[in-house]
Amino acid sequence: MCRILLATVMLMLTVMTNAQEVSREEIRGLDEQIQDVKKDVISLTSELNRLEEKLLFPSNTQVALFVSLPDSAEFSLESVEVKLNNQVVAHHLYTYREIEALQLGGVQRIHTANVQTGTHPLEVTYFGKSKSGKEYRATASYSVEKAVGPKFVEIQIAGNQSAINFKDW
């Protein structure tokens, strides 16, 4: 990645020193080369992110927790706190856009961790408000049964019912 950046800088310096001698066709060619370099950098960054996730969270120890809202959620989620093995592992304050995405059926990955096989206590607390201004708060517990292989748990928050439902994927 450093080589690509260095090559781009060198290319730009060459262009600047020969600016008066460069024709429009050559400038278009350089623009195309720069766009190709940008695409390569984006592709390499994406691949590095995937490799980093595989390295940090191997599939045999990975637990991922996701937050969702039911289709008929008529309330605004304000915050969620997640405890795994009696330790706070995530606390999230929601923006308007995040709430809107969740209400439209989106799912948020709130936490990914490495845990050993066995049973792990999970506790989730949320705060929210209905459209009329009524405040909701609930806490629920769940036992995450981790076996060999990745484990995915959906935390569905039904605010107007003060309920939290858990679903293994």
Image: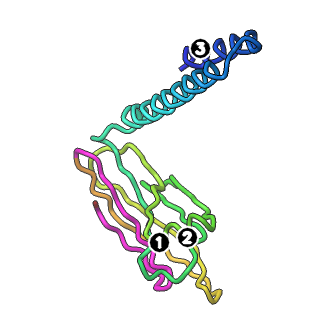
Q: What crowding class fits label 2: few (fewer than 14 Cα within 10 Å), some (14-19), or many (20 or more)?
A: some
Does label 3 or label 1 sit earlier along the sequence? 3
Whether residue 23 is situated above or below residue 51 in the rendered picture: above
The stretch in magenta equals 148-168
Residue 67 lies in quadrant = bottom left
Q: Which residue is mark 1?
A: 104
Q: CA distance from mark 3 to mark 1?
A: 44 Å
Tag 2: amino acid: Glu
Q: CA distance from mark 3 to mark 2?
A: 43 Å
Q: What crowding class fits label 3: few (fewer than 14 Cα within 10 Å), some (14-19), or many (20 or more)?
A: some
Q: CA distance from mark 1 to mark 2?
A: 6 Å
Image quarter of the C terminus: bottom left
Q: Which residue is mark 2?
A: 100
52 within the magenta span: no
Residue 106 lies in quadrant = bottom left
- Label count reads 3
Give the mark toward the camera: 3 or 1.
3
Identify the residue at image location x=60%, y=19%: 5
Residue 48 lies in quadrant = top left
Please state which of residues 122 and 162 is positioned toward the viewer in this rendering.
162
Mark 1 and mark 2 in contact? Answer it, CB < 8 Å: yes
State the image coordinates of residue 23 (x, y, percent, origin top left): 67, 18
Identify the residue at image location x=45%, y=78%: 158
Tag 3: amino acid: Ala
